[in-house]
Image (spheres, rainbow, N blue to C red):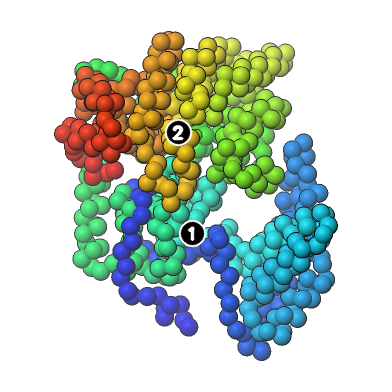
Amino acid sequence: MSSAEKVSSVQIVLHGIGVSPGVVFGPAFLLSSRALQVIEYNIAENEIDLHISRFEDAIIETRKQIKKLQNNLEKLSDIHDASILDAHLMVLDDMTFIEDVVNTVRRDRKNIEFVVNLVSEKYAQVLAAVNDDYLRERVADVKDVARRLMRILSGDFDNALHDLKHKHIIVSADLAPSETASLRKDMVLGFVTNMGSPTSHTAVMARALEIPAIVALKNVTENVKNGDQILIDGNKGVLIINPDEDQLEKYGKLSEFRKSIERGLANLKLQPARTIDGRKITLCANIEGTSELDSIKEHGADGVGLFRTEYLYLAQNKRVSEEDQIESYADAANAVFPNHVIIRTFDLGGDKYIPDAHIAKEANPFLGCRSIRMSLLYPEEFKKQLRAILRASHRKNVKIMYPMISNAQEVVKANELLEEAKGELRRSGVSFDEEIDVGAMIEIPAAALTAEIIAEHVDFFSLGTNDLIQYTVAVDRVNERVAYLYEPTHLAVLRLIQRTIDVGHKNNIWVGICGEMAADPVLTPLLIGMGVDEMSVAPSMVPLIKDAIRSVSYEQCKELAEKAMECKTAVEVLSICRKMLKDVAPELLELT
Ligand code: PEP
Ligand code: MG
């Protein structure tokens, strides 16, 4: 069948969650499913050799990849045991396995992907049944190697995207945050996924890159075929496969209308983020890397409220040297001077998994060795980062922030390591900000409920509501099946936020919010009314939030917050917030 024949002309409209705004139209490019669906088909006699030679090539490529991984692991030898991959190489060298695959292709005349899966499953089952702990443990190795082989056979992520020659809309079951980070804006118009949620790091990254995106489409990979023309509206979460002329015109006009609102908002760039009655809110930007620094200026932010430094690591898939870290942090500090940059220490784990670490194999990564827990587990690595931050701080506009704090002792321990790092720099005669501010992210209910104890050890709090919500209502932030329960305006969440702000102010420390709640203009008046001092959002969202801030009075906001606290449901809160935005800045509703 030719590729033209494969393209369907049936029109289908799908609804998901728009996580990164913008309307785009273009051909679909289907990435192989992350869940690796194995296709089975018969092959002709004269195709057998071709399939066997693809298998041989895949073995060579797999071996190369494993060796490379092993080299990387060896460089990180204090954490990792590179020898684990020897077992994977042994599977690849196992002649019984290889011959079994080749013989099965010849005998059954099935495609190679199907046969590799079949034979490796058989091997795994046999090993699992053996009464020998060592052999049973090899099941995971066989599965791992088979998965790698299959990915290569079906064209893996990097290769597939690398080969794109024209702009496409990526269609995939799911995307990891690191994969999203590697999308090339010149070849990727937008992306859509079956899975995902608005606060997943994949969505966060899409907004940072300003690539229109829709997640939680459930079965988009089954409805779209390679080459289908698709239209996506990243604001409203609508996807149309093979749209007709009328729809293209309608969405073209809508996009123009939104752009005209955005052009109006761009005039606010040099205006302060201040309410009608004069309450100043520090409006900062969240960044994942230094490539976003220009965007901060362009959109008129007051500084950086969250630098997600773990993306330095994820972008290269390996540790970042102290020197490279200093360069990134100093670039950020210089770019926003005299405004501040809040550098958050590595927040690895959760959905920002590290493919080469054993730690990633936890059953519940969001509840595991994530974030500050991982930093404290590897103090030398942590100190390396702290030294790098300190060395970028001599202009006194850098602040340090610890993520995922669950008790005051973690802050005390982190501060002790910070003092050690300072001592090391003093001894080397390196200058830095001796009075550097330290903050704690409040993103676990336990931290919010004991904020007065944590307050003794920090200079500021920053509410990480993306995690605070998931840990409060017990809803995995990346699981679309329970996304309906992920409610930012849940009363429990609002009470924890209010408590944190009140405790912070009572202890003379300011309180910011850098979770995605801060980027929803519908919630801006509520957060102002609750007393938040700083908001930090994706650079592209700064103009919207500034407009929302400048459209209300602090008095109005306080009244709204009081009313919200008396509501009984999250929906009620949302509805009074929407009503207020509709009254004061209706144009923003179109953009959200
Ligand atoms: C948060 O949890 O709200 C936050 C800002 O951190 P991250 O999204 O990186 O977990
Ligand atoms: Mg967080």
Q: Could you say where residue 89 lies in the image, as x and y percent from the top left?
A: 79, 59
The tag earlier along the polypeptide, 2 or 1, is 1
Tell me the residue that label 2 is attached to. Answer: 472
Amino acid, disc 1: Ala
Residue 257 seen in the current view: yes
Tell me the residue that label 1 is attached to. Answer: 173
Amino acid, disc 2: Thr
Q: Could you say where residue 541 lies in the image, as x and y percent from the top left?
A: 34, 37
Residue 430 seen in the current view: no
Q: Which quadrant of the structure image shows residue 119?
A: bottom right
Residue drawn at 41 percent across, 63 percent down: 220
Which residue is situated farthest in the left direction here?
583
Do the residues under discs 2 and 1 have CB atoms within 8 angstroms?
no
- The kind of secondary structure element at disc 1 is loop
Residue drawn at 47 percent across, 46 percent down: 478
Q: Position of 218 compared to 378: left or right?
A: left
Q: Is mark 2 within 8 Å of ligand 1?
A: no
State whether residue 458 is above or below residue 46.
Answer: above
Q: Could you say where residue 8 lies in the image, as x and y percent from the top left?
A: 37, 75
**Measured Cα–Cα span from mark 2 to mark 1:** 28 Å
Of 337 and 226, nearer the camera is 226
Q: Would you call the spot at circle 2 few (<14 residues within 10 Å), some (14-19), or many (20 or more)?
A: some
Q: Quick one: quadrant of the C terminus? A: top left
Residue drawn at 42 percent across, 48 percent down: 482
